[in-house]
Each structure stands twice: as structure tokens, then as C-alpha cells.
Image: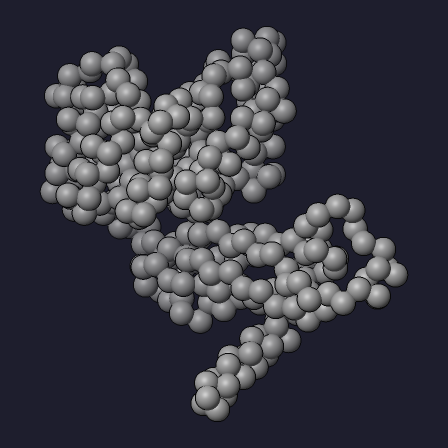
Amino acid sequence: MNTRKSRIGIALALIAAMLAATAIYVHAKQAQGNPASVAEKENAADTIAPAVEAFPMQVATNGRPDYMNNVEYTDSTHSRVKIAVDSSAVDLSKAGEYPVVFYAENEAGNVAQAKTSIEVIDPKEKIIYLTFDDGPSPNTPHILKILRDNGVKATFFVTAQWPKSLPYMTQAARDGNVVAAHSYSHNFKIYSSLDAYFADLERIEQEIEKYTGQRTRIVRFPGGSSNHVYRRYHPGNRQWIDTLKAALLKRGYQYVDWSLDSKDADGNHVPVTTLVSSACHTYHPQMCLLMHDAAAKKTTVEALPAIIKYFKAQGYKFGTIKSTDYVCHHGEHGMWPN
């Protein structure tokens, strides 16, 4: 028993030392209601630790990660939270995935922690990001099986178009795939206003959290960031989509387009040979492939094994998009992943 107490004491001392050494404060949002008055703060016995949420990160080898951009805090009473980051396990000189732990202490001395990971990527390494829009659908379990059988992972930009299929998000996450946001309704009316867009995004966020246990900060716009559909609702304002993109980034999200298109959006029964020939190119060491997980996209499922086989033969690794540091934007310098 004394040994166990001693270990706990050492661990607490290490955390305290980290927090003392890392004198970084953020003004956290209050978890509920309005900020407490000074008198309430002084008189209340605060025993509640801050709420901490940490998000995955991505950085190139020998890069300089901005750890503070990947953590969020709320506190029930106090306005300031002191934070420390334990990145001692991270080797920025070597590609791989490493654990990172955030510690948060409020002014009453209550401490909380949140764990996440950082992926260090060699910019010269060949990586293909398989992405599927519009699901989950009745096709999702077939896609998941193919991914498992081939030992690869993918990123699913999900909707709520097939409510009975929503639980497939749970299995996708358990398999190590990433579940990110596409749209709740996939109705282009979401582009009628910023409020309409973010209301829809919040609804799909709630579904993602319900089935995976966590929210996401990764988004793909229906139609991509270079779509022209929004012009139906904003005639004469061709910069409105830029306003939306800026608002999304300001809220801590990252939007992801694609650099390679399977062409399965051209119809519901595009021949497998067409999908494979469209998807299988190697003109960049890191590429993001667009595919669809809609109920009618059965030929996409049939084409997937051949697509995976091709990229394996070309020496590509299969990545997932889990960090806001990942950039693939249409029409910008960041078209290719960082």
C-alpha cells in the first residue's frame, strides 16, 4: 500500500512541477451560465477540475507543432486555466505516431488531463488518403470489411441520410478509421446563410459524438470548397464561400478537399474499370482520393480492392485525416497535403 501511495505521490509531484514550469494561461469559457462573481469565487469551495478536450495533431519531420492550437478548455467557475504539455515521447526527427498529454489546472488547484496523439510525417513519404463521402449507408459494412481484410484505414465524411446506418460509425471508429463531418442533411440549402450551415454542422457533430464518443474538427463541404452551388442563394456575391471558409477556420475546424477523384459521383453505376483507372494515379507523393459511400455506389465497393492493391504495389502507405494541420484545399497553394 505504501509503495502505491508513493507512486501516486511521485506522479502528482511530476504534474505539479510541469504546471509550475509551464506558466501558460488561457481564459477558459465557463462551462455553464454566466461568469461567476468575484464574491462567489471567493466563497465557493471549488472542487471541480477544468474540462479538457485535446485533438490529434500532424506535423512534418523536424517541424514545430503548435500544441496549444489543439486543445480546448472550459471551467465551471474560474476564468484562468494553467496548462502544461507533456510531449516527451515525441520524436520529431522520425515519422510515426506519438502520445501527447495535456494537463490543466484552474485557480483552485484542480487538475485535469487529456490525451491525444501527434503524427509525424516525412514529406517525402508516399501516402494515399482514401476518403468516402455521404455515408454511412448500407454499403458501409462492405467497405469496412474490405479495409480490414487489406489492413488499411480510411476517412469517412459522414451524413445522416440513412438513419438506420448511423451505427456503422461506431464500427468504423473502432477499426481505427476516422469519422469526420460532411453534412447532416446534404441539402445545399445549408449554403443559404452562415447560420444555416453551422446549424447543420452542429447536428452531424452530435451524431458523430453519439456513435464514436468524440466530436471532430475535420470537415468536407458538400461539393467541395470550390463549389458554385452557393451562388443560387447569394447571386452577385462570388466571395460568399470565402466568408464561410474563414468562419469555419475561425471556429477551429479544417476543411478538406481532394486531389484525386474516382469519378464515382458521375453516376450510380459507373463501371468498375472506369473507377479504377480514374483513381489510380501516382503524380504526387501524398494524395487524397475522393470516393462515395452512398447507398447506390455499389460499383465503388467493387472497385475498392483493386484500388488498394494498386497503391500498395506503388509503395504508398494509407493515411487517415485526423488533424486540423492537414491541408488539402482546391485552388490554393495548399492543394497538396502538408
Where does the image place residue 198, in percent across and percent down from the top left? Answer: 58, 28
The residue depicted at 31 percent of the width and 59 percent of the height is 95
Q: Is residue 117 left or right of residue 72?
A: left
**Residue extending farthest right:** 39
The residue depicted at 44 percent of the width and 52 percent of the height is 56
Where does the image place residue 306, in percent across and percent down from the top left? Answer: 12, 32
Mark yes or no: residue 75 visible.
yes
Where does the image place residue 274, in percent across and percent down from the top left? Answer: 16, 19
Mark yes or no: residue 286 visible.
no
Question: Looking at the picture, does residue 217 appear above or below residue 75?
Answer: above
Q: Is residue 210 left or right of residue 177?
A: right
Question: Looking at the picture, does residue 14 appear above or below residue 22?
Answer: below
**Residue extending farthest front:** 1
**Residue extending farthest bottom:** 2
> Foreground: 15 or 45?
45
Where is residue 246, by image quadrant? top right
The residue depicted at 69 percent of the width and 66 percent of the height is 47
The residue depicted at 23 percent of the width and 38 percent of the height is 144
Question: Looking at the picture, does residue 71 appear above or below residue 6?
Answer: above
Where does the image place residue 129, in percent across and percent down from the top left? Answer: 29, 39
Question: Looking at the picture, does residue 196 appear above or below residue 151?
Answer: above
Quadrant where the C terminus lies?
A: top left
Q: Is residue 280 left or right of residue 179?
A: left
Where is residue 116, by image quadrant? bottom left
